[in-house]
Image: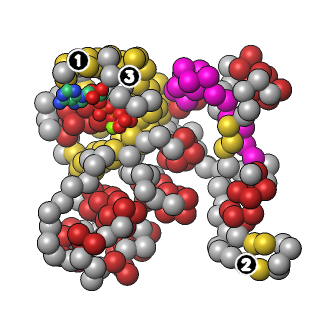
Amino acid sequence: MRSGINTFLDGYLPDDNVRIRERTVFEEVERTKKAKGKVLASFGEMSRKAGDFELSVAKGEIFENEVLGILGANALGKTTFAKMLAEGHASLSKKAVISYKPQYIETDYQGSVRGILQGVAESDDFPALVRQLDAERLMEKSVRNLSGGELQRIAILLCLAKKADVYLLDEPSAYLDVDQRLAAAKAIRGRTAMVIDHDLLFLSYISDRAMVFTGEPGKYGEAEVLGLREGFNKFLREVGVTFRRDEESKRPRANKTDSVKDREQKESGEYFYS
Ligand SMILES: Nc1ncnc2c1ncn2[C@@H]1O[C@H](COP(=O)(O)OP(=O)(O)OP(=O)(O)O)[C@@H](O)[C@H]1O
Ligand SMILES: [Mg+2]
């Protein structure tokens, strides 16, 4: 399995001397140890009951040009939290304008991609985003016929091209292939954003800090904002999984439970390689 995945990522079949695709590289992220910038917006402690589910979120803030990665298992209230912010029920202070991409993209728009993007086509970021998200060739397609990954890219484009203080994206990596995930990550990085996702590689690639949801799925969820390392460790300790970096492709790989590396990392508390 390992050599199959690495061969795919490398894009080259040595036995046949054939290139099958462009090589995918997981670069190490240069995380500039920037001094904490200015607080762009903050939210107070909040709670919400939805059916049998109860969510409570500790107060937190978001710094300018920081990406807050939001992680946690299914049904712990991540989407509920995002909706509360997007709908203004739990407003960010300072009246920050939020551009929101929901987890489920529903549209009954009958026209073309070019048509649905009309409102944002004049924005300064638009041409670069079209290039980054490989959207030019989708322009004349009908929105209703887009594939899952195509629709996701257009939804991300629509969200990021809007002028806003905070970009709030719920599961932008869903339906995207590995290269498109890396492209989406690059489009998000450098903005002030809150990003919910289940792809740890994707999140580790874009995040400056982490917001972690814990609790009992469907019953209750609790969340707090932490440093990146602290946040990833908390999440992974919760699910009992450790990650190392694959030497060849540099991608994060889950360690086999109880393997030497798994035990070593659990002992030292370093669940995610650093
Ligand atoms: N309007 C509602 N009425 C009843 N229950 C709700 C409502 N909205 C959400 N829930 C419940 O709240 C819990 C949290 O849902 P939420 O969508 O916030 O989870 P999530 O963390 O985003 O999960 P996932 O990772 O699967 O997207 C779930 O058990 C869900 O069924
Ligand atoms: Mg969700």
Residue 255 falls in image quadrant: top right
- As measured in the structure, the alpha-carbon distance from the residue carrying label 2 to the one carrying label 1 is 53 Å
The three-letter code of the residue at mark 1 reads Asp
The three-letter code of the residue at mark 3 reads Pro
Looking at the image, tell me whether mark 2 or mark 1 is earlier in sequence order: 2
- The secondary element bearing badge 3 is classed as loop
Q: How many marks?
A: 3
Residue 74 percent location from the top left of the image: 40, 31
Is the shortest distance between ligand 1 and the CB of mark 2 under 8 Å?
no
Please tell me which residue is depicted at 43% across the width and 42% down the height of the picture: 197
Please tell me which residue is depicted at 83% across the width and 78% down the height of the picture: 16
Q: Which one is nearer the viewer's eye here, 121 or 171?
A: 171
Is the shortest distance between ligand 1 and the CB of mark 1 under 8 Å?
yes
Where are the magenta residues, as a range? 230-246
Please tell me which residue is depicted at 18% across the width and 21% down the height of the picture: 51
| Residue 41 visible in the picture | no
Is the shortest distance between ligand 1 and the CB of mark 3 under 8 Å?
yes
Q: Which one is nearer the viewer's eye here, 208 or 215?
A: 215
Disc 1: which residue = 52
Q: Is residue 113 left or right of residue 177?
A: left
Residue 223 falls in image quadrant: top left
| In the depicted structure, whether residue 181 falls above or below residue 86 | below
The three-letter code of the residue at mark 2 reads Arg
Disc 2: which residue = 19
